[in-house]
Image (tube, helix red, strand yellow):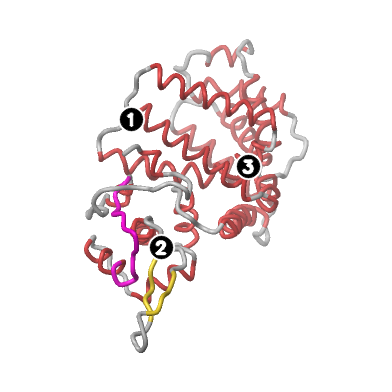
Amino acid sequence: MRWHSFHIERRRVVGQGASCHNGPSRLANINGACKLRQMLTLDTLCAEMATSGRHITRRGARDWWSKGLLPHPLRRGLGQGLGTETFWTDSRVLCQAQVTYDLLAQYARTDFALLSLWLLGFPIPLAAVRRIYNALITRALRAVHGRPGQTPEDILGGIANKTAILQAKNGSMPVDARQTLSDLVLEVLGIVYGLDDEPELEELADLWREVAPYLNPNASGGREFASGNGPHDGIVIVLKFVKDTASLPIQHRVMRSATDSELMRARRLVLVASGHIRRMMMVNQKNLEPWLYRLTIAIGHRAVPILVATLRNETIRHQIARSLLEVARAARRSNYKPI
């Protein structure tokens, strides 16, 4: 089954075949690896989980769906005096339960598991997704703005100095270049955390030109950066993008107002990107699947707020659509056969 075909919208079926495998890498084996059934009862869910090496009680399952980790089940009466039966009709519930178990076993954080399940295409309430992203961004901002006795500039300055010192240890960087790198990192962090509303991007590009040869002295073009003849306009474009779209205050504002369709569109792009990565790598070895699985989560956790902000620009939205079409055409021309 194709890697990216697992990450699909609610209207499509997820996977076929045997239940998820046991073993240390089983988290990655969600790639089309769960049984399909017309109806799944709570007792059957617990039994199937135990069979796959993931033990969960009826009470534990109830706790999961009360937190949104599983869809809320249906109930039906079994007859007079026989009680009720709890069940699901969504064929993905067993696979979602198995992935939930593995996520909690590795990370032990409900919010992380919820967001990861949503990024992988499972049905998670979008209100919860929006809340989690806002909480993550707020936490990141408080790490700089909420420390008593320290100004944000002091905190970011310490990070910038450590970055420059670490980079200097990895190569021969003069003291003045190290200070320049520290200044550059501090300015970039100021943009990311919204401390500088009007950064002098051209001056930052000059700083980048000074330190670029020491960051990668063997790269072609490094000396051109140093001599001032290189195409360092690219760093201006990147920094302007960060200021206008990717800074944490911008992300916070965007996610508070993000609509359901904007969230779903951003997730769809993340899933398409992970699918294309798999296709380009021509992955057919199971030992690479865990990396791809985690890559989807890692990209999505960071990219969705930025994508929501970016896609509000109609011009960029059309450019992305054209790029995706070009990638799809190139894949067809290469006679790639999905795995």
- Viewed as shown, does residue 141 lie left or right of 66? right
Q: Which amino acid, by three-letter code, is at mark 2?
A: Ala
In the image, farthest residue toward the right: 198
Mark 3 or 1, which is nearer the eye?
A: 1
Q: Which residue is mark 3?
A: 308
Secondary-structure class at tag 1: loop
Q: Does label 1 or label 2 sit earlier along the sequence?
A: 2
Q: Which amino acid, by three-letter code, is at mark 3?
A: Val
Is 187 magenta? The answer is no
Horizontal and vertical percent for residue 253? 70, 49
Secondary-structure class at tag 2: loop
- Viewed as shown, does residue 185 lie left or right of 65? right
Secondary structure of the magenta portion, mostly? loop
What span is colored magenta in the figure?
A: 32-44
Quarter the C terminus occupies: top left
Residue 303 position (above or below residue 137): above
